[in-house]
Amino acid sequence: MRQLTCTAFTWLALTTSALSFAASPQHGIAMHGDLKYPSDFSHFDYVNPSAPKGGAFRQAAVGTFDSLNPFIIKGVPAAGIGLIYDTLMESSADEPFSQYGLLAESVIRAEDNSWVEFTLRPSARFHDGKPVTPEDVIFTFNTLREKGRPFYRAYYADISNIVKTGEHSVRFNFKSTENRELPLIIGQVPVLPKHYWQDKDFTKTTLTPPVGSGPYKIAKVDSGRSIHYQRDSNYWGRNLPINQGRHNFDLMAFEYYRDSTVALEAFKSGDLNFRRENSSKFWATSYDSPALSEGRIIKESIAHKNPTGMQAFIFNLRRNKFQDIRVRKALNLAFDFEWTNQNLFYGAYSRTESYFSNSELAAKGLPSSEEKALLEPYKDQLPAEVFTREFTLNKTKGDGNTRNELRQASRLLKQAGWTVRDGKRVDQNGDPVVIEMLLYDSTFERVVHPYKKNLERLGITLNTRIVDTTQYINRVRGFDFDMIVYSIGQSNSPGNEQREFWHSEYADKQNASNVIGIKSPVVDALVEAVITAKDRPALVTATRALDRVLLWGHYVVPHWGITQYRVAYDHKIMHPAVTPPYQLATDTWWHQKK
């Protein structure tokens, strides 16, 4: 994207002003409704503004890393790298989607949503002391769209151009006025220093610590093993209201381990002082110790209101074997969640039956009249059940008896042309049906194993292949898999990111997030309805319709979810009494000297 000349800046500013009117400058921006915090707020409600600075926060990362550039498709970026960057705006953790100025001291949004303008704080500085300028903002967006991951091109597709409108101000002009989320999306982007990157190859991985403007600097890098971030005592934004009571630890350390089991042992031995637990088995059986009973380790479940998204065994629709919806239905029937939950997870989970579970965005019951208005034009392209049945997954008694489910599955497979020959399921061409489940963590084998046994009863061979993190990432990016365990996270305000998750345009683009490979004109249209929703009720309606169509497509074998963060930490680590509903917000925690 070319940068405009000063004459062009002036002309564009004048003509744009003539065509669309702007509200007055604001200290923040909300997706829907009003901001919770006024312009003179002193700190967020969920922080301890008197939290002391100091101490270390040590946590685990599983796998490896080989890059400090998280914006490109090459390499595996280090955990926590976002700590070194600031964004134009900062989201609050107790509102669904509201932002307040960080690098930007104010924001102006055109009343017709044709543009948004940010005015930077004159005090904003990069770690090398150079000011953050409109040129840096323009450079960042151009670079990410031209050289960054495909995700950025999808995310910023509705930006027509970016212009400098003053010494500290920059305006983003939009291709259409329908994308209400776009101003907030722009506010989330880390701003990169043009003077640092302009003479470097942005497309290459690097282990040289880059320059940022955030609350932390990189202090130590041990490639693939650990990365440490040191709090910047001279951080330019330390006195801003949005930063009060935050970024309290002097050191943020991420230590790498080959798997979760080893990482847990490191926590129990004292090498780490914080752990977020994702294994119900570990949570139920692996923390009892003198340290816990004596209070030296705190074990806590913290409720949240975030959508839990969709974790699942996902099918790669680029493989012919998964093209028939009857096959996908059958493979769903072979998964016995109830037995798995009781015998492997200690009853800790509930089954996920929505891509937007734990939120008002999840499809419920039959379609509402508003949903039907979106769905009716595509009635001939959708399963009849979308309109006539509530989506539910098969439920067993949990006793391991899946005869009824496997009988149904066998009928579906036979209808799809997959028959049994000499005890083995063969496809339409007479070839044995063999599926590979690609994993990077051996702890998931215990979940795959009972699923494998049920598939064997259908005559299907399921092979498990465990590879290292780098190989796994490369294979998923290149869509080189049959099935994987995959998690599709969601927010309370879905928008542009849904394009790359589901849109046909991204089904065959390597490194894109449409990992499943969905190509559906109906899904494409509903994604656009989500993005262009005019208000919260319209967003809820469009998202529920999208959710409903995705569910009835049987693109995945849904797993399970939990509406709590399970954390364990050293007794010297403290957190505020008020926990925000939409983030764990460990950036508000602190080390208490005793």
Image (tube, grey):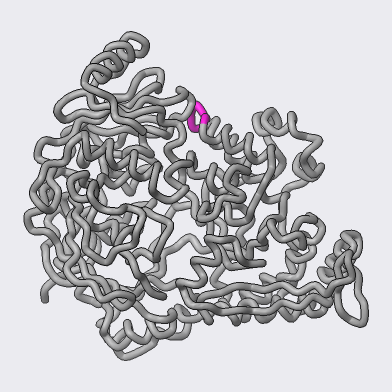
Q: In this view, does 283 lie above or below 190?
A: below
Q: Does the magenta stretch include residue 490?
A: no
Among the 4 quarters of the image, the one containing residue 123: top left
Q: Residue 446 or 478: which is nearer the viewer? A: 478
Where does residue 24 sit, x and y in percent of width and height?
25, 20
Q: Quadrant of the N terminus?
A: top left
Q: Is residue 170 left or right of residue 541?
A: left
- The location of residue 426, given as percent across then percent down, is 86, 72
Up the image or down, 260 lies above or below 84; here it is below
Question: Is 359 situated left or right of 483 in this image?
Answer: left
| Residue pictured at 16% horizontal, 41% vertical | 132
512 vs 210, left or right, is: right
Left or right: 228, with 458 as reference point: left
- Please state, as top left, top right, bottom left or bottom right, where the C terminus lies in the image: bottom left
Q: Is residue 225 above or below residue 387?
A: below
Query: Would you say the magenta stretch is mainly helix, strand or loop?
Result: loop
Q: What's the magenta region?
A: 532-536
Front residue of 406/442: it is 442
The x, y position of residue 175, in whole percent, is 45, 25
Is residue 298 visible in this depiction of the protein? no
Q: Residue furthest bottom?
A: 290
Look at the picture and state if 221 lies above or below 392: below
Q: Is residue 85 something that shows in the picture?
A: yes
Residue 535 is inside the magenta segment? yes
